[in-house]
Image (cartoon, rainbow, N blue to C red):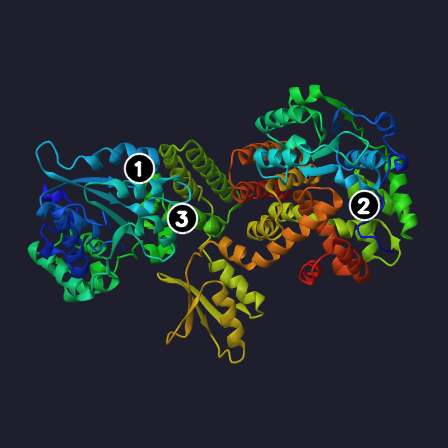
Amino acid sequence: MSGGMWAEKYRPQILDEMVNQTEIVSRLKNFVKERNLPHLLFVGPAGIGKTTSILALARDLYGSGYRNYTLELNASDERGIDVIREKVKNFARTAAIASEVPFKILIMDEADSLTSAAQHALRRTMEIYTRTCRFCLIGNYSENIIEPIQSRCSIFRFSPLSEVDAKGWIKMIASKEDVQLLEEGLEAIYEASKGDLRKATNLLQAAAATQEGVVDDVAIYSILGRVSPGKVREILNLGLKGEFLEAREALRALLIDEGLAADDIIRIIYSEVLRLGIPERWKVRLSDTIGEIDYRLTQGARPEIQLSALIAKLALAGEEMDR
Amino acid sequence: MTESQPWSSRFRPCTLKEIAGNERAIRQLQTWLKSWDKGIPKQRAAFLHGPPGVGKTCSVVTLANDLGYDLLEVNASDYRTKKKLDALIGRSIRQRVTITGKRRMILVDELEGISGRQDHGGIGAIAAIIKKTEIPVVLVATSIGERWEDKFRPLRDVSLHIEYNPVPFSLILMRIRAIAEELEIHVDEDVLELLADRAEGDLRSTINDLEAIARGRTRVTMAEASGLSVRDRKDYTPDALMKMFSAKTLRDARRIISSAHIPYDDLFNWIYENLPLVLDDASDLAEGMDALSRADIHQTRARRTQNYRLIKYMFDEMTGGVALSRRNSDGVGLLKLARIKVAELGFPPSDFTIIESPDGIMIKPNRYLKDDWRRVNEAFRSMGASWVRGGGCWNLPYFRSPQLIWRYRRTWHSRRRRRSVAERLADKCHISTKEAVAEVIPLVKVIFEENEAMARDISGWLGLEDKEADWLKG
């Protein structure tokens, strides 16, 4: 048992190792055979093989030294389009001389998080370096990518994995790692991660770390209680009970101690609220409030104040249930 | 006409001699102003700072009058942005005399109203004005704590800075005695001393106090003085909050903005921190928090558009909006938490008397604490209480200061480690650091807490330093 995070250990290295997304993989293999590719746009939900595909393609194309010919950027980590342009410039201005492939590949993950102004700037950059560099933009939604970029890219839509495929992957890792994964455990992992294999694999690994060999649903739920969604649910429940001070403390811990971004918290809150055991009418009402807060945050409002207002409102739902 | 004026303006000094105390500061200011007779001095601005009500503005006005200056008074809170300041002051600093031939000078008052962070260029604009002004510029800031000094640094470096001190007890006593005599009101010496004692060097507020108990009377005894409440001042932010939370009108609630003497964004944090300690009824709390969240929006808008006309809506929501939400609540600040604390420490409620006093919550042990004393002391001190020597009790303010800053300080190291671990994970797992923080680190922490072998493996794989691995173990 070694090799760091299992999600990386079992990430397919070459296109031949990929068992899912078969149609996309076969088209990508064609690019490798032709030794040429267009600009690419990969869209689809998290953890279903977008980054894996382009890394595998690069390895197939350049061999083991592929890192010399690729640059991975994550748009959400880069400070502004100017920094990105500078990095792209430095990377793309030299041709890939040592390789028989005449271009390099720039991978831009979470490209859909760039503002449209930044995307327009990126489009110019793509045009300038087209001769020496191919861009692979990755994102969750193609709607968030501007038209001019879409029209310059070959778009690949990654479809969510089927339940059978996702579970098959989890079982494969469990058996290779000698983890005895019970059916209820597998079910619980799938329920929490749906088709997101990275999430599923991390969850399995954490559960395996806490157990002596056997992973069941209780093990999974206990892990889930210790990560962000579990903590958010705790906050919501405190709010329902009218324990505002405690809930606010826990919210502060999440925002400051744990450094969770406000938009991540609001996303989790939204999905957790829908699962709360509260009157259906209240779900609609709270959804409206969350939507309002979500918008306010994009306008620069302070997350803690806005989320505290939501917590205070939860107590009203709680009171109505008690009556 | 003068009859209806508030006494603090009616008895405002007209000549330098009438200003009580701060002779040194006033002399400094005078010398500097006179140096303008010989041309533009090295320091083109004077920066006056000190506690409220000690005669800062007053001495500027009086001196300007004495030396024959035409004074342009600007209230910094009204002109918070660079653009507005430039429009107002920028032009006048080049016109040395008025149409009637009078020399001009500028007074920028209430400088503390400019918050360095948000008023893009507000402070900078003033600094720029100082550099090129051809007429005297006097800046006045009411400062109590050390903490505002940072934001004024650009100004202090280019100006002569003059510090004002609290007015001594004896001078305050003399002044209010003289006022009482002039008005032919007989005020008992005890009362005068009480007033002067409470003043803490703030002459203006003492005169206000005197007016509150003496106006319309011919004789004032201790009986009338007993109704005096504690004054809103920086040291008394908790009391200012108490007044605000019990306000019944928007107007009364809004008063805290000017009376609290702290920047409004600090005040906002104070209100937010303490609101749940007052609004303990669920629907009151929801309404109050809603008002506060809208105050936040108004502030965001004012900041984004650089239009500080919009800030008044923030003030309304954060004061009136919060205070008027109080209908079914009976929370009295930290009182309830103090009781909970006693229970948490394992004492029966009868071991302590916890009562509300005008100065705060009094917590008095009913038995000899012996070895428990240290523990109890620590617990109450952590809530913000102070041990009253000789009183045999703790005194806890009704409200506590915003806790956020402490949390940031406390978590500084762990936040740094989190960041560096997140960066390594992001790199190794081909994800963003944001995702590493939200999705992966919590699970990695579970692994580190539970499974040493796996932790060591991951540690090596990520190339973590010992401190980072220890942090993950928690």
Pinpoint the chain carrying mark 3.
B
Residue A138 appears left or right of B325: right
Separation of residues labelled 3 and 2 (CA atoms): 48 Å
Residue B81 appears left or right of A25: left
Separation of residues labelled 2 and 1 (CA atoms): 57 Å
Separation of residues labelled 1 and 3 (CA atoms): 20 Å
- Quarter of the image with the C terminus of chain B is bottom right
Location of residue B447 (image quadrant): bottom right
Element type at mark 1: loop
Where residue A145 sits in the image (x, y, percent)?
66, 25
Say which amino acid is labelled 1. Answer: Tyr
- Quarter of the image with the N terminus of chain B is top left
- Name the residue beneath numbered marker 2: A7
Residues under numbered marks 3 and 2 in contact, where contact means CB atoms less than 8 Å apart? no
Above or below residue B191? Residue B133 is above
Q: Residues within 10 Å of mark 3 (few under 14, many from 20)?
A: many
Pinpoint the chain carrying mark 2.
A
Above or below residue A39? Residue B466 is below
Say which amino acid is labelled 2. Answer: Ala
Q: Which numbered marker is on residue B103?
A: none
Q: Which residue is drawn at 48% across and 52% down?
A: B277
- Name the residue beneath numbered marker 1: B79
Pinpoint the chain carrying mark 1.
B
Q: Which numbered marker is on residue B267?
A: 3
Q: Nearer the viewer, residue B13 or B178?
A: B13
Say which amino acid is labelled 3. Answer: Leu
Above or below residue A44? Residue A147 is above
